[in-house]
Image (spheres, rainbow, N blue to C red):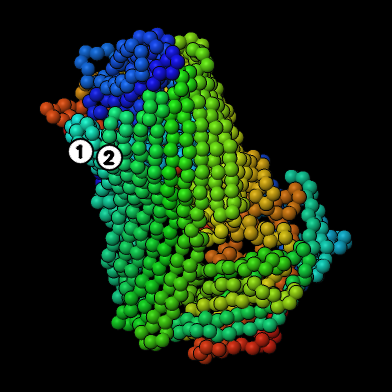
Amino acid sequence: MIIVAAVLFVGCEKVVDINNDPSKELPVVNAIPTVGEPLFVYFAHTRFFLDTNNNQPLADASLTVYANDVPLALDSIVRCRYHYAYEPQEGDSLRLEGITPYGTLTARTYVPRVPTLSNISLLADTGGQAFRFYNASFAFEDHGGEAEYYTLVVEVRDSGARRNHREHRIDHVDTTRSVYFALTDNDEITGDASYVNAAFGFFYTHNYFNDSRIDGRTYPVKMQILHIIDTTEIAPFKHEYTVSLRSVTPARLRYIIDASRQRGTSSFFSEQGQVRGNVNGALGIFAGVAKSSFSFCPDTLGIYGGVGAVASSRELIERVK
Amino acid sequence: MLCGQTATVSGTITDARSGETLIGATVVDMRSGKGAVSNMAGHYSLTLPRDSVTLRVSFVGYEPQEVRLLMDRSHEVHVSLVPSLLLQEVTITAERPGDLRSSQMSAVQVTMEKIRSVPVLFGEADLIKALQLLPGVQSGSEGGSGMYVRGGGPDENLFLLDGVPLYNVTHLGGFFSAFNTDAVKNVTLYKGSFPARFGGRLSAVLDVTQNNGNDKELHGNLSVGLISAKCNLEGPIVRERTTFSFSFRRTYAELFIIPLALSLNKNSLAGTSTSDGGTDAADYDAGYYFYDFNARVTHKFSDRSRLHASFYMGDDKLHGAIHTVNADDEDVDLGFSSLWGNIVASLRWNYAMSPKLFLNVTGSFSRYRNVIVGSVAKQPTAGDHNASTIEGDYTSGIREGSLRADFDYTPSPEHSVRFGGGVTRHWFSPEVATASIDYFDSLLMNDTLHHTLDIGSSMVMANTFTLFGEDDWSVSDALKVNYGLHLSCFRLSDTVYPSLQPRLSARLLLTPDLSVKVGYAAMTQYVHLLSTTSVTLPTDLWMPVTRRVLPMRSHQVAGGVSYSLSGIADFSAEVYYKHMDNLLEYRDGATLLGSYDAWENLVCMGRGWSYGVEILVQREVGRLTGWVGYTWSRTMRLFDRKGQELNNGEPFPAKYDRRHDLSVVLNYKLSERVDFNVTWVYSSGNAASLATQSYPIAQEESDDYDHMGRRGAVNYIEGRNNYRMPDYHRLDVGVNFHKKFKRARRCINVSIYNVYNRQNPYMLYRSSRDTYAHYPSALVQLSLFPILPSVAYTLYF
């Protein structure tokens, strides 16, 4: 019986032979025109999932991008990236046309308006020697267009290096329902494990999106941040939280949701989802983005400052990009 | 009671040895050819012209009896049949199967002898695994006890234990069914053309009846298998008046499997280095078991009145605890337990109100619940002053109580009517999760943190009302029609879903050995099982329909032909087409595990259709018995409603769409002491979604890396279930050694599962060489069961 049990626990695994079928390759276009940032377009074809080589540029292919119906000058091509001498601005209308061995492709998008943030504050709440709650809040104005959607990205940085970030989607703000999220945030961070707790912190919040409106188009966002303080003997580590609110197109929001689902739940327990793009004749996404952000360093607010230590709105607003 | 020129003969058909009532026994008037079939209480009623008649009473496995009567008035005739095995020097003759003459189609009555004759996994005879060998019934995955009937999902099957729905019918993640074969007397599986008395599920009805118990003397058996032991005891409390039947089964595999598993994993579990450079030994405690307890007490007030009390209780429990010291020399306790299972209880009263009218009143209760508890506790040590405890629990379940009455009425030789109704009260506890965090700092007495988070839904209550009526009408000697109507109404808060479900089946007897049948059934289902895997997990949720999630409905038509080659074999072939609406599937990427979104947001509704051909050849007499079943089928899904599209709104094959499914089951009786069993199964591979192409994810400048610091990739899936796993086939063999003692007999069963060690696919996954690799390096197939010998010993007394 023990032998049988051992066999069962070992299980049986074998590699399944599966070969690439080049006829299943498709062209890929990825571009996120962002206000104030140089535009580049990733232009390649898909690769067989067991192929460990990097994606290769498309041979015998051409790509043209139009801003407000004016073709953009191609600045350079670095591997699969087509760089253009152009920085998108609010309200720009963008169009993309391409010719590949797989056929022609087209896509359209626009550049959303930059969200306006106000009333930013950070309030130290209860805490202890090893942790501290902060109540962060700000308000932003919805521009009211039907095609404006937002994502909230919170990043944690230390010494300028990216350690971790979390992205949360907000439905179109015309809705007034609460958006709940509860992050456990216990993923490991690659790198020096000694600083994991220090750099981490996690968001544990309710009513991140408040039900009530301040006025017709201004919405308060409240977050409660549990910041885990580094109590090791290693020198205290400075880290910085960056909160970024981004205005995105519906296609971009759908893409983010699809990709997040596919990445986050590609497990035995769920059906891996398809990621829907908006490029006719190709896979990928062509969608504009505009963002506002602010940063704060919890450590500088005074760990032992007690309940009520406040970072002034003015201090934080000055950091708003 | 006389009615014109007819008189009625009625009574009960029982086993002469045990007094057990026989379900589905036939009573036929030899002259007119008119007949009746005993109902679930073993009761029959046959109205015949006033004349002298000869009744032939027969049942498979029993010696037929003939009764001569002068039908000058109504008679009560109770018949006890003698099992064929008890008769010496008897040549077993083939009874023309009731299936050939019955108007019912797409139904299979399976004897426990057949089920026990199938080679077994781990020495444990399994009712559902035996049914999976029938055409039209497929297993979900290797070794699983899920049933996929004619393209329907496992939640579309109504499992009735003594007439009461059983919600969780599996143990050990689905590898064993919850039905203890020792406690079961009769099993009937309906795959289509459902009689009007059944409702509530789309695809199948499995009607399981427990033993009443021997009314003459005490009997029982003890059985020991590879992972479980079971016992059954039955006998009279008051001879020929009150009987009992108790069965108990429990696994004991944890006695050796868990210690072995812990031993194999000891290094990985206890490999944490301490500050002094050593490795701590950790304390482990873990276990898993399941058990079933079946009980039934029957009291016979008179030959016309019986009271049955039935009870079933079965649970699975998985638990584990680890006490260890972490890298910071802190004591850490990890605990986990999961308990899930059913309780079913019923009280049934059978009463023959008159020779033509039989009453059946049932009150019942059924409960399924699942509780998962996990905790992590860190204790302060000499060098530390912080303590913390994180606990979480998750509860879900369903309860229901019902009261119903149904009648069998035989007004004339041509009609056999059943009618009745009932009401069921449901209590759904969808999912309630509680998480709590306690943090205490002994240096700072006020420095405590306590937070509790309750997530989930509150209890949902609903009612179902049902009415039904059906008539089995012998239009002529050749033509028999069963028509009926099932009316149900589901009320949930202010939402009401009525449903009118017509049923029809007809048989045309072309020759005494050849019949043609057709059938139609509309079905409605008001509960959904939310399950994310092919494996039965305790996290599977039963949920009611809501305003947004509509009842599932199906329409099925079937046609078939049955032919009996007397004394040799019986042939049957059926074709079917089933259309299903409001089916549920998880949205892409959605999973119930770790997700507390409103469940309605995780699913979308769509359609499905299934069609196929089923062929069954079976032989029930002689030394060589068994059957060959073959199914050709196709099952598709289409989710194209706005906002609920799957696969871009295009049709896709269902997960268990299999083109070919073949089962060969043979039993050869070498002598009274030895018999051999062989089973070979073959089926087309399951469908799975596999992305063979990928491309980089489009990210904004500050999103270049995912939370693991890696660039992401998008997997391009051509379509849902676009890939076919390798075909499945397996050979099992078994041999039974019987020996009789003075007051007992024993059977030693030796079985070998998967004789030629076929590595059948259980699941596929993309494997990477290391944790941080960007891309998979291989497609790996996981197989569960290699060649597995087992032995079981059973002592009957």
The answer to whether mark 1 and mark 2 are in CB contact below 8 A is yes
Relative height, residue B424 to residue B355 (above, below): below
The local crowd at label 1, few if under 14, some if 14 to 19, many if 20 or more residues have their Cα within 10 Å, is: some
Comes first in the chain, label 1 or label 2? 1
Q: Report the amino acid beneath label 2.
A: Val
The local crowd at label 2, few if under 14, some if 14 to 19, many if 20 or more residues have their Cα within 10 Å, is: many
- B241 displayed left or right of B406: left
Residue B224 percent coordinates (x, y):
23, 40
- Residue at mark 1: chain: B
Residue B794 percent coordinates (x, y):
22, 35
- Residue at mark 2: chain: B
Quarter of the view holding residue A298: bottom right
Q: Secondary structure at mark 1?
A: strand
Q: Residue at x 42, y 66 (%)?
A: B392
Residue ID for mark 2: B297
Q: Quadrant of the C terminus of chain B?
A: top left
Residue ID for mark 1: B237
